[in-house]
Amino acid sequence: MIIAGNWKMNMDRASAQKLAEDLSGQAASMNNNAQMIVFPPAILIDTVVASRLNENLQIGGQDCHAQPSGAHTGDISASMLVDAGCGWVLAGHSERRTDHHESNQDVAAKASAAIDAGLSVIICVGETLEERMAGKANDIVAEQIEGSLPADLPHDRFALAYEPVWAIGTGQVASPEDVDAMHNHIRDVLVARHPNYAKVDILYGGSVKPDNAAALLALSNVGGALVGGASLKADDFIAIAQST
Ligand code: PEP
């Protein structure tokens, strides 16, 4: 079970240090199988690496470039994340797809670069409200998966995050029934692509909070959560991790 915290463009050195200390301190004494990973802004990765008390708290980048190095002002490469102490990276978060116009092809190239550099990757997909209302959610998500997973992606190096765009940062969590149906659909799409993808964790993301986490994490094809707002408070994030 993966409990991942996407800090987005939040926190400063002092708050990142405190959160890393609190989370890693509590992660060491948790008696379930939750693997906690945080995704700080790139400039705070060093702080989190230096501040965590143990490696029970894993660290990832929020994005990486598809190229290993070169003239790409403002970007960072997958190998830079490895060098900084990361084991993970997000690819294709809806805010990247929207703000930076990342296509499925871009996401696949980034995921591929991440694997080449030695990272594991959480690939994000999810439909908009308009697409859901039009009855297209299953098709859109299948298309995103088809396009965003690079060829030969090893099953033990990635997780897939289903994040309906309308549920991210809105407080409007998807119902357990909808999450169950979509995660079952995603499992079918993954297994059709490769039988080993039966083992891949499928995370749910979108307004996960301590009071709704248990019902979502109990679903058979939910292998964890990708958490935004609630990952910025140690007590909330730990409570979510303890709901597994
Ligand atoms: C996210 O950032 O991926 C996310 C799901 O955010 P929130 O939990 O705030 O909805």
Image: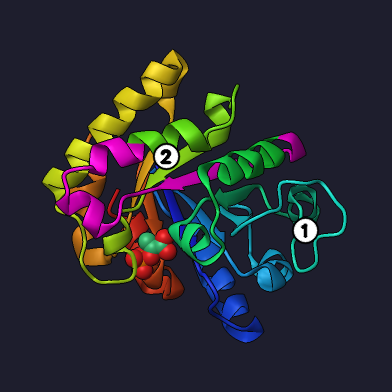
- The residue at 58%/27% (across/down) is 153
Residue ID at (21%, 61%) = 173
Q: Is 66 located above or below residue 213 in the figure?
A: above
Question: Residue 59 in the image: x percent, y percent?
Answer: 61, 56
Q: Is residue 158 left or right of residue 116?
A: left
For the view shown, which residue lies furthest in the top direction? 195
Residue toward you, 158 or 47: 158
Q: Nearer the viewer, mark 2 or mark 1?
A: 2
Q: Is residue 240 shown in magenta? A: no
Q: Position of residue 214 (x, y in %)?
A: 21, 53
**Quarter holding residue 52:** bottom right
Instruction: Identify the magenta region.
Output: 116-141
Residue at (27% x, 66% y) in the render: 209
The amino acid at mark 2 is Gln
Determine crowd level at label 2: few under 14, some 14-19, many 20+ residues with C-alpha closer than 10 A. many
Contact between labelled residues 1 and 2, with CB atoms less than 8 Å apart: no
Quadrant assignment for ligand 1: bottom left
Q: Secondary structure at mark 1?
A: helix
Label 2, label 1: how far apart the Cα atoms are: 30 Å
For badge 1, the amino acid type reads Ala
In reply to whether residue 128 is colored magenta, the answer given is yes
Residues 5 and 163: in front is 163
User: In the rendering, at what x and y percent does residue 201 appear?
Assistant: 41, 35
**Residue 198 visible in image:** no
Whether residue 162 is visible here, answered yes or no, is: yes
The residue indicated by pointer 1 is 84
Residue 97 vertical placement versus 134 (above, below): below
Query: How is the structure coloured here?
Result: rainbow
Q: Check residue 144 in the rendering and tell me which mark sits there, or answer none.
A: 2
Locate the N terminus and report the quarter of the image it occupies. top left
Picture coordinates of residue 148, whole percent (x, y)? 51, 38
- Which residue appears at 46% of the width and 17% of the height? 194
